[in-house]
Amino acid sequence: MQTLSSELQARAAKIRLLIMDVDGVLTDGRIFIRDNGEEIKSFHTLDGHGLKMLQNSGVQTAIITGRDAPSVGLRVKQLGINHYFKGIHDKRAAYAELRGLAGVAEDECAFIGDDVVDLPVMVHCGLPVAVPEAHWFVKQYAAHITLNHAGRGAVRELCDLIMQAQGTLAPALEEYVK
């Protein structure tokens, strides 16, 4: 488990909704496009299982992404992500709508992003997080920068961090060794 600063612990303990960008967060940021226009994305299983564990602990999950890729929709269904906003160009408006749907205040939201289009959400949520590959300007507004890389467990790291702060991680992990 991570050693959390008292500020990070306090912020993470309040989280009731984790919001994610997709490209450069749940994926490594590369987009493969086939000759027929089909996009191919790569997702990490650690992130997927972390999201399921977080949901089981009572935290809602959401995606706000600027793209509309069918593969993301399939992954959303596989993981049971509660809220999915795709093809969004105004993430600030989507964030306001999402908070209403989820019934949460800004300080109860965490957001993990990587680029300047994520800042309208990051600067208003309770726990703004960036991945190591994030644009330098975005990193300035992050309360935490993950050690794990985008598409390689960064989201799992954040899920674990939230659960640790809320006291739900150790009991969840213990279930696997009974």
Image (tube, rainbow, N blue to C red):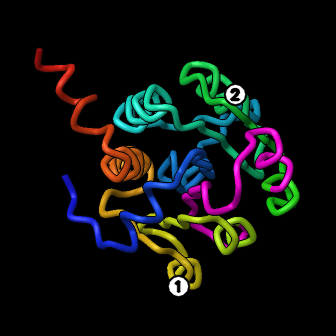
At label 1, the amino acid type is Gln
Q: Which mark is residue 73?
A: 2
Q: How many marks?
A: 2
At label 2, the amino acid type is Gly
Q: Residue at 32% x, 57% y: name it.
A: 148
Q: Residue 159: x percent and y percent?
A: 41, 45
**Residue 61 appears anywhere in the view:** yes
Q: Residue at 38% x, 29% y: name it.
A: 49
- Left/right of residue 25 with respect to residue 65 in the rendered view: left
Q: Nearer the viewer, residue 89 or 175?
A: 175
Question: From the image, which quarter does the C terminus lie in?
Answer: top left
Question: What stretch of residues is rendered in magenta?
Answer: 96-117
Q: Identify the element where label 1 is drawn.
A: loop
What whole-number distance in Å separates the C-alpha atoms at marks 1 and 2?
Answer: 31 Å
**Residue 152 appears anywhere in the view:** no
Residue 148 in the magenta stretch? The answer is no
Q: Nearer the viewer, residue 164 or 77?
A: 164
Q: Which mark is residue 161?
A: none
Q: Residue 67: x percent and y percent?
A: 76, 47
Q: Identify the element where label 2 is drawn.
A: helix
Q: Residue at 57% x, 45% y: name it.
A: 16
Q: Which residue is mark 1?
A: 140
Residue 99 in the magenta stretch? The answer is yes
Q: Residues within 10 Å of mark 2 (few under 14, many from 20)?
A: some
Q: Residue 77: x percent and y percent?
A: 63, 20
Mark 1 vs mark 2: which is more N-terminal?
2
Q: Residue at 73% x, 36% y: name it.
A: 84
Q: Residue 54: x percent and y percent?
A: 44, 35
Residue found at the far left of this picture: 177
Rendering quarter of residue 111: bottom right
Q: Nearer the viewer, residue 79 or 67?
A: 79
